Image: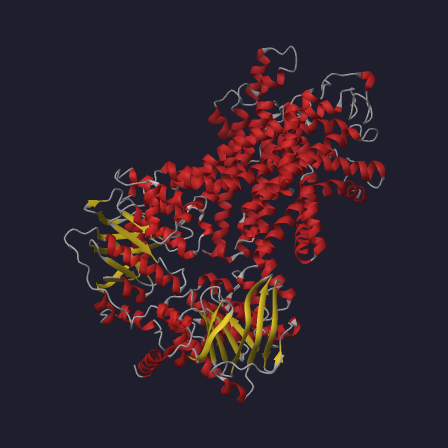
Amino acid sequence: MSAVIPVAGTVTNLEKAEPLLAVRDLTIDFGDKSIVKNLSFAIEPGETLAIVGESGSGKSVTALSLLGLLGPRAKVAGAIEFRGQNLLPYDFKRLAHLRGNAVSIIFQEPMAALNPVYKIGRQLSDVLRNHMNLTAVEARIRVLELLNKVKLPTPEAKYDQYPFELSGGQLQRVMIAMAIACRPKLLIADEPTTALDVTVQAGILDLLRELQAEMGMSVLFITHDFGVVADIADRVLVMRHGQQVETGAVDTLFAAPREDYTRMLLSAVPSLAKAGYRGNAATDVRSPVLQLRNVGVSFRGRRGHVLKALDGIDLAIARNEVVALVGESGSGKSTLGNVAAGLIRIDQGEVIVDGTPRQGAGASSGLHSPSLHSPGVSMVFQDANASLNPRMRIGATLRAALKWGRRYRPDLDASDSYIRSIMAEVGLGPELFERFPHELSGGQKQRVGIARALSVKPSLIVADEPTSALDVSVQKTVLELFRKLQQQHGFACIFITHDLSLAATNSNRVVVMNKGRIVEQGPTADVLRHPSDPYTRALLNSIPLPDPVAQRARRAQREDAGANP
Amino acid sequence: MGLAAYCAKRLLVGLAMVVCVQVIIFLAIQVVPGDPVEAMMSETAGVGPEVIEALRQQFGLDKPIPVRLLDHIVGLFRLDLGTSLQYNQSAFAIITSRLAVSIELVVLAAFFGIVGGIFFGSLSVRTRWGDRLISVCGPFILSVPGYVLGSVLILALSLTLGWLPAGGMAPFSDPLAHMQRLVLPVITLALPIAATIAKVTRFEILEVRTQDWVRTSRAYGFPTKVTFRRDILRNALTPVLTISALELGGLIGATVLVEKVFNLPGLGSLLVSAVGIRDYALIQGAVFVISTFYIIINIAADIMYGFLDPRVSKR
Amino acid sequence: MKRYILPLLAITLIVFAVAGPVLVSADPIKQNIVARFAPIGTPGHLLGTDNFGRDVLARIAAGARVELFTALLSTLIALTAGVVIGVTAAYSQGLTEGVLMRLVDVMLSIPPLILALLVVASLGPSVLTLIGVLALLFTPGFARVAYGQTLSVRSRPFIQAAVIYGAPRRAIVFGQILPNIAAPLLAQASLTIASAILVGSGLGYLGLGIRPPMPSWGGMVADGQRYLGSHPMLMIVPGVFVVSTILVFSVLGDVLRTLWDPRERGGR
């Protein structure tokens, strides 16, 4: 093997000083499947490198391989040099000294990454005492310092709480406290904000930047989100199929991507700044498809605790109109979607579909029941896979929906030729008719969901985060299809999403929800350009812009505002 | 909800359970066609109807069923389980005299079974031969009924090799003879428990091992042993505990068989002979004691579960 | 090939139970004092004779019929009753759910063999009682599995989809829920057959199963135990049949469960 393989674009930078971490010709195989091929990169002290790619690109596997966390099935070859020492082949005694000490890591699901049966304080002090010689009392003091440092509210109380008593954002702060406990030189962050809401994500990213500046550590940031990349990275490495596509400084890569794949990814990223807003729909507001009047839904929790999932909702959806419901988790947007689809009984108010009040509304029960059925409303689910009966072929799934629909509307056509024509319309080949769901890709399954929703000739489709489980490139094509179908068939649509930039390009009207209430609604362009409600503004400001220059400007502005309130 | 409230709630549910079970037992026995006195007397020739009537009054069988049920439940709280027709003695006294042997068997078998099961279950994950042992011997042991296993052990270790006595019981005053006579019955009872617990422990460990927090533990440089004890075994034990409590139900049933195989004077053999001659007070009493014991064990397991898994008791 | 061995063995056992008495010409209850304790391999008595000179093979075959017949029938009854209870409870929720599942809890809080003894005590030993007892014993187990499975399937989006597209209740239960909970129930059924043989033969051993002189495997072991010192084969032969039958059905159940469980298949 020759000396250093030059990494394209940063040759001069690299050769000056010895990098903190240098990875050369990293190749990772699982059995006879090659997950990472000849990957080389380096991280300088104090630098943030973001590895970005779609699912299956091998980015997380790369991150885990640095600490030897892939398990015995993985064959790792090449060189991983940390401060000049090659970690390959793994020497687990030496790695144990490095792990959590000079190199630490945080994960995607903070709730799953902490052991549910130990208190927060115990888990942190265990980490401290594993690498340092501390008494229990000293460890406790250090832990409380750390919890303060990651800005966890009421650290003394949190010390004695269990992971399930904290929120996702708080737990990620605890994980960060654990990661910085031994003042690492390198922090590996494996999609640390993917499972979090945007406002929470913004807080975590701020914290990471602050800690990095203060402690001078390097960060390897794994993500699929170009907004996050623009916000946090100094340099970017784009991966696909286990290989490097291109790498470079964040500004140059965003401004002038050299590779087609990078260009394609960047163009698929939904962006508020570049959004082509849709105008108002040509529609008749006097006879709405769906009308909700003062609708309330509560769930009974344990110990008689009542949670108001929806409170005083007034909403009308007109024909041919796409209304985006946006909000963070727990805002009630999905509950509202389920009410519209007839999956949940309401406790209060009334639901009118196509001019007729829905049967069964008003009865208080969280139970779904066929008596709530409204012909004319159909739904596209977030988890396309789970929305298809695993034991039914695609054709049979579509036929079943039509046959059930014929009980209410005998004019529906349930013949195979009609089903095949609908499949063709959503871009599914006729050969898929006899396939089972598990034989289809994620994007194909969602197309089946769309075909099913479309086949019953609905007046309203509820689309609940239909693309959030898909990669950006697939998301783009599915949304384009959906938009085309909506314009052709003219059904009204409730489009539920947590992503404001998707709402921007895909809706006529936006309804912003928070804590079970509607905080703001209006034409999409108006609301997103000139938000009047403080919550909407906070939400808009938290979305990292997929443009490093603009994002830097906004961050500076936010920090100024923070400095002189 | 705190742990204390959780415990109190479990205890109340347990008490309700005891009463429900008792009602079921009562109904199962009393509300069948024909009555016990007739059933008993039909075997004895030449008993006049007036004798039967007198006996019925003596045992309170002439009163309507709800009254008898109430009397019965009230009696339970005064530890009055009725009078045995067969021995003409307080059923409670007879049962307590037989209790010691059965409890000894159950406790010893449960202890060795659970501890051995957890040990071999953990071993099977960490070593290849342990894995073989569990996957080959486990299903086999579980398919041998207690009465067959007991008979085989007697044949091999008592009759052929002459190492241990074949059956019967010796009093506590002769500890060596007492222990010798317990060895085979306890092995017979503990083996299937150990096999089940080992299987469950193994399954749970494999399950927990894939959890994210185990990866975290490795990623923060904890020694393998610490990760195994702190983050794998500890979490795997919670479901093992639940299964252990359930297994005790099977263990209590197996005790009945094993007491017969080894000819031990326990509660199980008492129950079997009582069923054979339909001594209802004795049957009711023995089933009551056994099911109450089982319910208590299950409550204890639930409460321990609350300690082991904070998510259960803290919500 | 290997995957067919267990089902084949199970079928062989069932065929043996059905056709055994036809294949073995000897009468299982005919005593013959002259030919007592004939050893294994005696012409005309392949597995020897017992203390009354009865043909052991004939008794094994007749016993197989009893043990398997009671086990299969009671499992079928318990499966049906358990599925009805479990699915109803999970699908209806509310009061029905509470009452049904508490009832199941109470049933489960009596140790199985003890419950069996109780019922035998009140109804007297017979084949019908045996089937009833075993069915009663295993119904709560099926109810639990059916309940848990239905609950987890019920909340999945494809059921919600069926509701939205107007599926009637019947179509949801029979067309959507049952096919998706059938596999774990089938595995449970196979394990239950094994348990039913275990408990049933145990009752036979205690003399509380089927009335003598009708042979049962458990009863044969009990009889054989009395001659353990002199003629151990009288215990060992029926013992081997009990053990291997239980083994076949329980391993079959485990295999079925593994096939169904995606975690074990390495799917996720």
Measured from the top left, where is residue C144 in percent x and y? 50, 41
The quarter in which the C terminus of chain B is drawn is bottom left
Quadrant assignment, res C232: top right
At x 47% / y 66%, what residue is drawn?
A108
Closest to the observer: C84 or C116? C84
Residue lying furthest bottom: A16
Measured from the top left, where is residue A459 in percent x and y? 24, 49
Closest to the observer: A263 or B88? A263
Measured from the top left, where is residue A124 in percent x and y? 53, 70
Q: Is residue B172 visible?
A: no
Residue lying furthest left: A286
Colour style of the rendered protein structure:
secondary structure
Question: Vertical placement of A227 versus A522: above or below?
Answer: below
At x 56% / y 79%, what residue is drawn?
A22
Instruction: State left or right for residue B119 relative to residue A141.
Output: right
How many numbered badges does the structure rendering display? 0
Question: Vertical placement of C180 versus C60: above or below?
Answer: below
Measured from the top left, where is residue B51 in percent x and y? 59, 14
The quarter in which the N terminus of chain B is drawn is bottom left
Instruction: State left or right for residue B273 relative to residue C174.
Output: right
Instruction: State left or right for residue B59 relative to residue B120.
Output: left
Closest to the observer: C165 or A265? A265
Closest to the observer: B122 or B159? B122
Q: Is residue A55 visible?
A: yes
Quadrant assignment, res A255: bottom left
Question: Vertical placement of B197 versus A225: above or below?
Answer: above
